[in-house]
Amino acid sequence: MGSFQAASAELFVTPSAISHQVKTLEEFLGLELFVRRPRRITLTHAGEDYYRSVQEALNEIDRSTQKLISTHQTGELHLSVAPAFLTRWLLPRISSFYEAQPDVKIEFSAATGLIDFDRDETDMAVYFGNGDWPGIDIQLLRHYQQRPVCNPKHLHGGVIESPSDILKYTLLHVAKRQEEWSSWFEQIGVPYKESKQGMYFSSGSLTTSAAINGLGFALADVGFVSEEIASGKLIVPLDDEYYRTDKSFYLVYQKNRALTYSMRAFQSWVMEEMTKDVSSPAS
């Protein structure tokens, strides 16, 4: 089964304290619950029976504790977010959340790795991927849909009437995802052949910045560049054509966790904002 040493590490008490409590329980019951061997302990038959009997009660105590915590209207939320989602989508909109929930304090962190919710202080996270993460609850936020965007000045007066017209201009690539442009053209049934030397960058954020600065066409999720589109820094010349990747953004948190007030408030707000994006003509 293990050892009192392992139990003490999990419960943050000394091994002797665990041993003493177990001994006290055994004396109260008049039964031995453990077989003690060097470096290892196992349950006796009586211990196994007792464990099965009290396990559900302990689970109920845990559920009741989580429910009590969730109903206490804590105003703190530790939120870990995929960097692109944080800078391009969340931060430009977050002021509306604070207007609706002025007592909720959010601590943001940008991260690309997975969170160990059992050990980390993070309450919720936004992941980017295909949604196959075990041991957590996940909720789809948005599919990642890419469309060609550019600074209107880059066209030099030209007109984009069909997807093939884009190939006359410089294409901006993410170095680690060089297949994106070819996949986009393949999806819409247009032969892919660049007429100009493309430019390569380390991230999608940089290709977007390059497009804003008039260096060429980038593939971007329109929801992430809505401000630039509204201000005229970027245009979407073929807004009926998009490429949906196999990856999406998801809101995730610890499996079976009872949500706190601040977690429920953020979840409700972010889903409402997603609904606005879906219904917006620009999306």
Image (cartoon, rainbow, N blue to C red):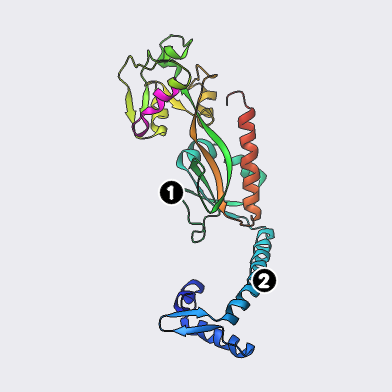
- Residue 145 in the image, given as x and y percentages of width and height: 51, 29
User: Residue, x 57% and y 80% (percent of image)?
Assistant: 45
Quarter where residue 123 is shown? bottom right
Query: Magenta stretch containing residue 258, yes or no?
Result: no
**Of 164 and 104, the residue lying toward us:** 164
**Of 7 and 195, the residue lying toward us:** 7
- Residue type (three-letter) at the residue carrying disc 1: Gly
Query: Magenta stretch containing residue 182, yes or no?
Result: yes
Regarding residue 93, the answer to whether it shows in the image is no
**On residue 113, which mark appears?**
1
The residue that label 2 is drawn on is 57
**Sequence-earlier tag: 2 or 1:** 2
Quarter where residue 176 is shown? top left
- Residue type (three-letter) at the residue carrying disc 2: Ala
- Residue 254 in the image, given as x and y percentages of width and height: 56, 55
Indicate whether 277 appears above or below 185.
below
Q: What type of secondary structure mainly makes up the magenta span?
A: helix
- Residue 18 in the image, given as x and y percentages of width and height: 51, 82
Q: Classify the position of the C terminus by image quarter.
A: top right
**Secondary structure found at label 2:** helix
- Residue 256 in the image, given as x and y percentages of width and height: 61, 56
Query: Which segment is the magenta one?
Result: 174-185
Work out how far the residue at label 2 is from the one at label 1, CA to CA, in angstroms: 36 Å
Indicate whether 281 appears above or below 129.
above
Indicate whether 153 appears above or below 9.
above
**Secondary structure found at label 1:** loop
Give the mark toward the camera: 2 or 1. 2
Regarding residue 277, the answer to whether it shows in the image is yes
User: Residue, x 44% and y 78% (percent of image)?
Assistant: 5
**Of 112 and 139, the residue lying toward us:** 139
**Crowd rating for badge 1 (residues with CA inside 10 Å; few <14, some 14–19, many 20+):** few
